[in-house]
Image: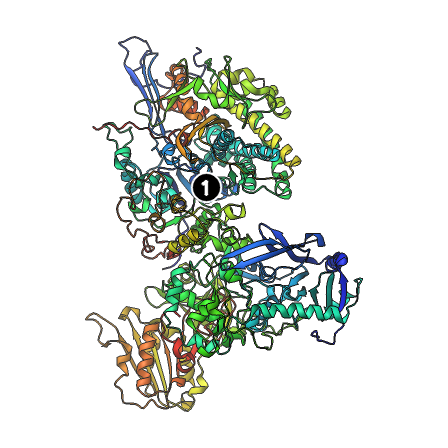
Amino acid sequence: MGRPTTAARLRVGVARFTSCGGCQLTLAGLHEALLAVADRVDIVEFAEVLSPRSSGPYDLLLVEGSVSTPDQARRISELRRQARLLVTIGACATTGGIQALRNWSDGDAWRAAVYPQPQFIHALRTSTPISEHVTVDALLRGCPIDPGQLAELVTALLVGRRAQLLDATVCMECKARGTVCLISSQGAPCLGPVTKSGCGAICPAFGRACYGCFGPAHPANVEALKAQFADQGRSDEEIGRLFAGFTANAPAFRANARPPLAVLDQPPVGPEPAARISHGFPGVPPLTASGDDDARQ
Amino acid sequence: MHGSDLPGGGAAGPGSGDGRSGSAAPELRFEVEELTRVEGEGSLRLRMRGDEVVEARLNIFEAPRYFEQLVRGRTPDEVIDIVARICGICPVAYQMSAVHAFEDLFGVQVDPEVRRLRRLFYCGEWLESHALHVYLLHAPDFLGYDSAVAMARDLRPLVERGLRLRRAGDAIIAAIGGRPIHPVSVRVGGFSRAPRRTELAALRPLLEQALDDAVATVRLAATFETPAMERVARLVSMRHPDEYPYNEGHIVSSDGLDIELPAWRDAFSEYQVEGSNALYARASDGSAYLLGPSARIALAATQLHPLARRELEATGLADEIAANIFRSVVARGVELVHAAAEALELVEAYRPPDAALVPWTARPGTAAWATEAPRGLLFHRYELDERGRIAEAQIVPPTSQNQAAIEADLRVFAPSVLRLSHVEAQRRLEQLVRSYDPCISCATHFLDLTVEEA
Amino acid sequence: MPGTAEATVSFLARADLDELIQALRAGGRRLIGPTVSDGAIVYDEIQQAAELPHGWGDEQGPGHYRLTRRDDERTFGFVVGPTSWKRFTFPPTVPLWRARRDGTEVSFESAEPEPAPLAFLGVRGCELAALGVQDRVLRDGPFADADFRARRANALIVAVECTTSASTCFCTSMGTGPEVRAGYDLRLTELDEGFLLDAASDAGTAILQRLPVRAATDAEQARASTAVAAVREELGDPVMTDGLRDRLLANLDSPGWASVAERCLTCANCTLVCPTCFCTSVGQASDLDGLDSTAERHWDSCFTPGFARVAGGGDFRARPQDRYRQWLTHKFATWVDQFGTFGCVGCGRCIAWCPVGIDVRQELAAIAPPPESAARSTGVREARFVVRATAPAREPLVQAQASPAPAPVAPAGTGLDFLPAVVRSSFPETADTLTLVLGDVDPAILAARPGQFVMVERPAFPAVPISISRLSEVHLDLTIRAAGFATAELTGLGPGEGVGLRGPLGRGWPIEAAVGRDVVIVAGGIGLAPLRPLVDRVLSERERFGAVRLYVGARTPRDRLFGLDISEWGTRDDVEFAETVDRAGAEWLGRVGVVTHLFDTAEWDGSQAVAFVCGPERMMQAAAATLLARGLAPERVYVTMERHMECGVGLCGHCQLGGFFVCKDGPVFSLAELGDAFGREGL
């Protein structure tokens, strides 16, 4: 009960797994605000910007990237132990990313390699989100994440309030912006109605359909939208490719994702996604609204 | 080969004693297990016996993501979205190399304003990428700090300048592409939406400031003390008769190569090195070569914007830039000036295109092209089938191509750090690697991983 | 003065249309009108007549909208597009107040709306009605939205009668068009050669006088009427609105809800294109330290997943079908209870812009079908829902006033503005609940009635509704459970720290109804907090009431509130007091069991008693059932409902329960009032 102590400076770290690096770059993409944040917290680990590495502990650990090697699976468990709050950022960390499409493929082509020396990559058969390995405390979606949402998360943590992340669909942001809906006016296969808000509805504002890089909304009535696309003349193959994108591995999309190279005709192998989004911990409510539980669909 | 003129100091590394060479001399190892202030995950391994470099390796162990597999069966527009995700710092470069390759195969002519918008787009990426490198990743090495955050405590206005330059670059990309990372509007045939004149005009104040900041950057970079190292490398870049190279031109080299962009494979090839997850590249004669700002300045300086040329000349370092990779920071500064100056002109002259997007039809065949990413030449090649879908892909990023050069430089430079403390030597070696502005995410995108059972 | 048949009708030649445009823009007014953009006709700022969509038309159907090229150059040859005038009267984001913290001091400043004067060109009959509906919701109630009121007052309306229609229109059924009858400054009807114009206000007349018009001929007027009448004929009467409210509310358990939910994406598009939907949320934009924060109002939608969620995680409309039912029944039934009109004006936008083409006309016909005798197929596409070929003449849905009279505004401190108060002391009640004693409280708030609540705000935090748990001449007690960040922030405050209060809000306990009668008070858990001021009042005027019975329950002994008060109540001989806990260890010597056990077998006669109940909803349902079984009349059993509240004054839409706004119609309700709304799942 009561406010979090703000006397000690928060120790903040940024850890990277399998990714393009764009989401942690969004931290640098706060531009001058990055310095304002650095004034108030100790950024103890952010390897792309800082030299020394730290082994923790962290008050806030931002994790980018998916788990795609055995070494990474071990490392995330260690990091979890060191972090008071672990927040995954980006489509790779929250759903497995575009590289998760390999989860659909035949094992022979993508066999995990086993090498005796630790510097060699032991690539796992699958690319999986962080939440399949450890409990995460909050997540920021997107490919990449939205800088406004990142700023809000950091502000919320410093102020001691809940992070205000819009829990709606891309449609809400599109309409707020005044963009004309591409589905009704063009018959475009836009995933906006089943995609979680957060990006500000960039794609329709720039004349192209949403491709779901923020992952599924909750709920996401994908079947109904698929039926509509089919009515509008889209082939099954095209619809399957549409869901086989950057968040293909998210539960609401994965059953409908058909990557072109898939040889399995069913959803990919891999452990059932565990309900691994924490609902806060004693004395501190969850950092974001509880609609972020991917598994509770 | 020049030795180091750094002040000797501190104990030399373990076992190097009097530095005598010969088989009796014990082996010295420098290992940086995880390079920092570079994009991506790599490690450095150097083994010396006396003055002799036994092994110099940049190990890239970042997990591969298999992009050349992921794009198979996709349409050209899907490929444009997917390849951006190879890199968070240079998504524009990937989109530009891909889109030009497809348009070349399909015979698509874009609106002239679209062509200029694409140059402006690239100016934006060079601004944000070079500024990131110079100020956040590299400058701390020269100014004696461990990180930009530490540097900001003493030299805040300096770091703010770097962040301002990034903001200007990001703003250009967002105005044209919707967001600075993984822009959304690049399509075969142009852009899904062209900005309004007012939207680009709004960038003017940011760009005017960016030009001032870029000039200050060159001048600052020219004052940095760098180890006097020299290695005559083969330099490779694009060159165009009328403009500084971004999206069009020929591939040229310091030793007379001049080929069309799609013909990269005629002069270069990729090969695999055991233990690294990134493919290397070499010229047809097996030699290493260097890409990036230093190469571009050396080969195409005549096409720099006059303001950038003037700044380059004022530094008096043009020759050093070609020979000493530590001077790449000056080259980046000059290119920042170029990008800001050209961006201002493009914004000024902009008129929305008649056709932001022209119609096109896919054709089967080979689509190949190269563009100049901030870090150097980025080559894409796609085989398309009868349905216009990707059958095979080859993507060769600049950092992969630079790996051999990095290791060659390490071999030249390493003896000069022997007499320093181990910590200091490691720092210098990392600084050398950083001079290449390596983008390791880019380098590890591929799949052709040979699987060996233990 | 509303336009009537006797008003002079003028004629403006097509070539002179730009004169009208410039006259509308005179004096710095921004003119918003229809224009072609991105494949649709949207409302945007225009500066010359050339920017209007001459020669453009539209073709609309469920989930379908296409621009078409007309074979003439008509300027208004289309109907409504994806934007509505709501965008300009009720924009997506509006600042509400600024909150600052300096040490322990807090200060609040409500935003002063200063909207630029606007002119709306091309307002259709249905849209005029929508403005009128918005007036009733946002301006004419006990609390007004200041920003809406200012924008509305500053907007000049140029209405246009429809001479074409889309297959999605049903203004005829809703009584909103196609004729334009009232609520405009200027009205336009288009003919091939020009426009008929008349003015219905001074502002409209002033504009008309500047235009090169002549009197319209009788023939011209007749042609205009005929054109509009033809549209009426085209549309028929697709929705049987007679008795619709009752039919819908009688079908809350229809299988049709689950059926439409199979297709519904809960994407919120329908609510966002709707010209009358008004649900909003409040967000905080603050600096990194939380010292300077602006609260902003954003468009929200009852379809969003967290819309009906309360602190602690309960969600009153968890299923998509609950949310769809909320929207449809609000639009066509409970809106009538709340505001006296339907919420829907028949513009058809929700049909065209639903990505999967759900058609409300069809859903109404399926879920609340009209009596058999009235249904008739006319062979038109989607014939299932065509009810009658011709809509009967109706009174206009809403008489929108072009220049509205200023509505009474609740005085500062009693509803809309935050006033600072200071924490004097705090008293932990349980592990997660704490009572703050506030001083320096504005007298208007201290004058609160028992059962009322206040919105409590700390800079950079959302405002939360907290019941007042004690009133005195100089102090106000708030008993707060730390269920989320905002309440945790409040329970962490120490003496001297400031908070903002807005209120007193809501309807309190109707104590007068209990005068002369026996009083039964049932409290569960933190439900005792809003009841304590009632107990204080009753005991301070003890002689006015009959027997006073007070039953208090808590989960465990450690969850008991107000230990001192309980001791005192237990020792009074003029109060029958009993308490219980749901479960306890050996150290508890009192009763164990649910609170209803304290009185379910008691012997007193409840037929004339008045009961006041507060606690978790399930506890209240059990208590209510027991009290009714004991003979109390439902109009004399009062409960206090909890719903998600963001504004506390009936404007944000979150707290709706059936036809009620819990914040302003409640939170206290009698069971008779609530009826079916009490205890119905997913309402």
Number of callouts in the render?
Answer: 1
Question: In terms of image quadrants, where is residue C92?
Answer: bottom right
Looking at numbered disc 1 in the image, what kind of residue is underneath it?
A: Leu
Question: In terms of image quadrants, where is residue B19?
Answer: top left
Residue C49 at least partly seen: yes
Report whether C71 appears left or right of A175.
Answer: right
**In this view of the protein, which residue sits in the foreground, A104 or B6?**
A104
Q: Position of residue B113 (x, y in %)?
A: 61, 35
Chain of the residue displaying label 1 = A
**In this view of the protein, which residue sits in the foreground, A120 or C491?**
A120
Q: Position of residue B50 (x, y in %)?
A: 32, 12
Q: Residue furthest front?
A: C379
Report whether C25 appears left or right of C268.
Answer: right
Residue C571 at least partly seen: no
Question: In terms of image quadrants, where is residue C35?
Answer: bottom right
**In this view of the protein, which residue sits in the foreground, C277 or B55?**
C277
Residue C280 in the image: above or below residue B19? below
Q: Residue at x 28, y 34 (%)?
A: A110
> What residue is pinned by disc 1?
A27
Image quarter of the C terminus of chain C:
bottom left
- Badge 1 crowding class, 10 Å Cα cut-off, few under 14, some 14 to 19, many 20 or more, is some
State the SS at label 1. helix
Q: Position of residue C456 (x, y in %)?
A: 47, 65
Image quarter of the N terminus of chain C:
bottom right
Q: Residue at x 41, y 82 (%)?
A: C672
Q: Position of residue A155 (x, y in %)?
A: 46, 50
**In this view of the protein, which residue sits in the foreground, B184 or C511?**
B184
